[in-house]
Amino acid sequence: MIDHIYLPVTDLKRSDTFYGGMLGPLGMSERWHFKAQAGYPDLTGFGEPGIPGFWLKASKTTCAELYVAFAAKNEAAVNKAYEAALANGGKDNGAPGLRPQFDPRYYAANVLDPDGYNVEICYKPWLYE
């Protein structure tokens, strides 16, 4: 449905470190670097091999209400991504565990990224059954 998205960040290098650490356990460790040109700012992209779908955009402002959720293929990947996020500058915003308010099988973790965005890492087992 969505081909790609740009997330405005105030420190591209800091956010590159954070998202690079967190997205690796989710299989999205490939990176692309686009240097500013033709009116576009510096960008860093992440995704599965050959598919840059999530981009960081150097910006002077952010959008505090933006919420991003990344899919994991199992609970272990949620746990690893959560720990990597904390190790790379993230702050806990909901430890890994079930989220029965959404579905009894919904397993997720939430962190705040370096700009304060609420980032969710979620595993929905029914997608893999």
Image (spheres, rainbow, N blue to C red):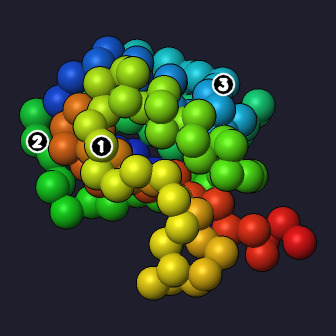
The residue wearing badge 3 is 30
Q: Amino acid at mark 2?
A: Thr
Is the residue marked by circle 3 packed among few (<14), some (14-19), or many (20+) residues within 10 Å?
some
Mark 1–mark 3 Cα distance, whole angstroms, equals: 25 Å
Q: Quadrant of residue 67?
A: bottom left
- Residue 115 in the image: x percent, y percent? 19, 38
Q: Count of labels shown?
A: 3
* Closer to viewer: mark 1 or mark 3: 1
Left or right relative to 44: residue 67 = left
Q: Secondary structure at mark 2?
A: loop
Q: Is residue 13 above or below residue 3?
A: above
Which numbered disc, 2 or 3, marks the residue that appears first in the sequence? Answer: 3
Residue indicated by mark 1: 92
> Badge 2, how many Cα within 10 Å: few under 14, some, many 20+?
few
Question: Residue 61, which numbered label?
Answer: 2
Mark 1 vs 3, N-terminal side:
3
* Residue 114 position by quadrant: top left
Quarter residue 10 falls in: top left
Q: Position of residue 59 (x, y in %)?
A: 19, 34
Mark pair 2, 1: CA separation: 23 Å
Q: Relative to 72, say whether 49 is above or below.
A: above
